[in-house]
Amino acid sequence: MLKKTRLFFTALFFTALCAFSANANVIITGTRVIYPAGQKNVIVKLENNDDSAALVQAWIDNGNPNADPKYTKTPFVITPPVARVEAKSGQSLRITFTGSEPLPDDRESLFYFNLLDIPPKPDAEFLAKHGSFYANCYSFTFEVVLSPCETFA
């Protein structure tokens, strides 16, 4: 009987976790970034479908989730690294290959594009009415594949 009760409450707990919906305001076009080695830069397009502006921070790392982005060395630069995406509008981020690290010519190199979606602080009227608020920051990670030019020939 105790085992069935424990199983019931465990199932109830996980069902409650699944009942909450998550809604990110900023959407990235595509599921990965292919960077041909001969190209000067690649554009990543963002779209904000919300009624309020959002702040985004972007960086590229080598796949270590515990690494501090300040100390991660990759041969790419994203401009702008921090941007405001207006409501019902879009923003383009430019990924540029700097060539600061030697990479193999005979195979593809894999890096990770990270985007942090930071929602705006509520206005004074909302804060006066509710007293406090809880904001969810959403983080997205996509593959960046640096491909040698011969692959596309």
Image (cartoon, helix red, strand yellow):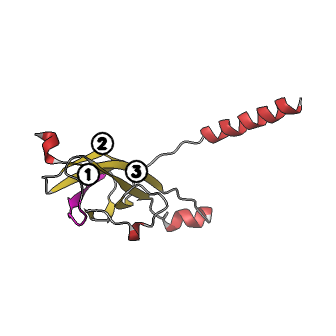
The residue under label 2 is 30
**Magenta span: helix, strand or loop, mainly?**
strand
Residue type at numbered disc 2: Gly
Indicate yes or no whether the magenta region holds residue 135: no
Looking at the rendering, in which quadrant would you find the C terminus?
Answer: top left
Please name the amino acid that badge 3 sits on.
Thr
The x and y percentages for residue 141 are 40, 50
Which mark's residue is nearer the viewer, 1 or 3? 3
Residue 80: in sight, yes or no? yes
Q: Earlier in the sequence, mark 1 or mark 2?
A: 2
Residue segment shown in magenta: 89-102
Residue 54 in the image, given as x and y percentages of width and height: 39, 59
Ranked by sequence position, the earlier of labels 3 and 2 is 2
Label 1 residue SS: strand
In this rendering, the answer to whether 8 lies above or below 119 is above
Q: Position of residue 116 (x, y in %)?
A: 41, 58
Q: Residue 115: image x %, image y %? A: 38, 56
Dot 1 and dot 2 residues touching (CB under 8 Å):
yes
- Relative depth, front residue between 141 and 97: 97
Indicate left or right for 80 with 21 as reference: left
Judged from the image, the secondary structure of the residue bearing numbered disc 2 is: loop
Residue at image coords 38%, 55%: 114
Kindly identify which residue carries mark 1.
44
Image point 56% across, 65% down: which residue? 127
Name the one closer to the observer, 153 or 106: 106
Q: CA distance from mark 3 to mark 2?
A: 12 Å
Residue 98 higher or lower than 110, as above or below: below
Q: Which one is in front, 130 or 134?
A: 134
C-alpha span from label 1 to label 2: 8 Å
Is the Cβ of the residue at disc 1 closer than 8 Å to that at disc 3?
no
**Measuring 49% from the left and 61% from the top, which residue is drawn there?**
66
Q: Which residue is mark 3?
A: 141
